[in-house]
Amino acid sequence: MRPAAAYADLPTFAAHLRNLFDPEQGNKKYVLLYAYNGTGKTRLSMAFKDIGKQGDARDTLYFNAFTEDLFSWDNDLDGDADRKLKLNKASRFFDGLASLELDNRIRPLLQRYADFDFVIDAREDSGDWNVRFSRVLTMTAEDGGTHTETLDNIKVSRGEENIFIWCFFLAIVELAIDGAEAYQWVRYVYVDDPISSLDEHNAIAVANHLAKLLKREDNGLQTVVSSHHTLFFNVLWNEFGRNNKKVERLFLAKNDNAYLVRETGDTPFFHHVALLAELQKAADSGNLYTYHFNMLRAVLEKTASFHGFPGFSSCIEKDRDDPDGILHTRLINVMSHGNYSLFEPTEMVPENKEYFRRILNDFRVRFPFNPELFAEELQQANAQ
């Protein structure tokens, strides 16, 4: 592994990232960049974008905190009835909106993560472009029967808004990959931390979906993905493949004088240890939510596979009153497959918290990890 390289500022490092895509230099297609919050990831994405600005020309389609600013709410404070999300039609981000039926591309993406619908008004003769949201609710009548009602012009939550914008972005990336005329200016895609509002389970889903899109055989775009989210980064790292020579995997840090960049190596993080540290931290604090069962199941399945067991239940310690482990296995099965809200995680009931702690603690006793490694990862989890 090469030693860490130092860069005086972010524009200098952004230029280096572009050089990695040069066939005569790095010849890479993807760059995965891990950095802690506060290091300057968003500023780096803008520095990368700015290098490609030549007059009115652009070459980078990016997703970061500034992308979200292209959408703003009109809450209809006077009438309190016509709430809509306004779009900044001056941005090139929306170049194909009026002619490419973008809503038909966004909707199947959004349905992976949310239960609301939308209508985009981007008529050429419209003064403002906007999005109105709706949701279908099942209502119970007095006689016990049910019917559905559609609530129009609703204001979605901040998390739901974020996932809508993310799906909007993915639809545009698809158009750019497909060679749509409105997005033929796109040469690079830069994604910075798209999953701040998602729980651990859905961070995996978003990473898998993004990797699948970027790995399309007909994708001629070159991409940087930066994140502070360990799980998201590791899933992408694995999705692109250990031996993929087209991928550069980097860790970015900052000291008083420079930005330090080094390769992550073959195993960027002890992910299973980091995940266990996060689970133990949640168990100790009592802040246990249903999605923690998804995380625990993932650890159990990987451990079972490594040790050659037929299933994750083999890694669960059996109680005296449950010698076959049926209760705990069934609990994990049910809790890790529930239809839980993406943006409003459900806290476990006290009884399930106790079961969770027991399963986790028994697992750590039965499959002991190096205490020094675990302590180091626990310290990092606490520091973050």
Image (cartoon, helix red, strand yellow):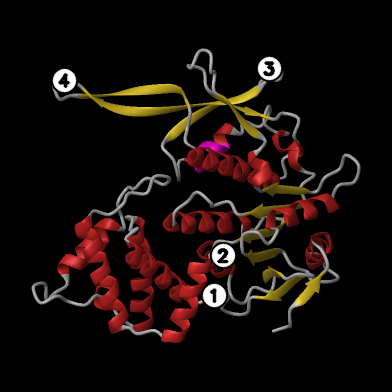
SS label for mark 4: loop
**Can residue 315 be seen in this snapshot?**
no
Q: CA distance from mark 3 to mark 1?
A: 50 Å
Q: Quadrant of residue 142?
A: top left
> Is 367 drawn above or below residue 281 in the view shown?
below
Q: Earlier in the sequence, mark 4 or mark 1?
A: 4
Q: CA distance from mark 1 to mark 2?
A: 9 Å
- Crowding at dot 2, Cα within 10 Å, few <14 / some 14-19 / many 20+, comes out as many
Q: Which residue is mark 1?
A: 269
Q: How many marks?
A: 4
Q: Which residue is mark 2?
A: 233
SS label for mark 3: loop
Between label 3 and label 2, give the one nearer the viewer. 2
Q: Which residue is mark 4?
A: 142
Q: Which residue is mark 3?
A: 126
Where residue 130 sits in the image (x, y, percent)?
61, 25
Circle 2: residue type: Phe
Q: Are marks 4 and 1 in contact (CB under 8 Å)?
A: no
Between label 3 and label 1, give the one nearer the viewer. 1
- Crowding at dot 4, Cα within 10 Å, few <14 / some 14-19 / many 20+, comes out as few
Residue 337 falls left or right of residue 192: left
Q: Earlier in the sequence, mark 3 or mark 4?
A: 3
Q: Are marks 1 and 2 in contact (CB under 8 Å)?
A: yes
Q: Are marks 3 and 1 in contact (CB under 8 Å)?
A: no
Magenta span covers which residues?
105-109
Task: Single out the residue that lies furthest toward the top.
Answer: 79
> Is 332 drawn above or below residue 71 in the view shown?
below
- Crowding at dot 1, Cα within 10 Å, few <14 / some 14-19 / many 20+, comes out as some
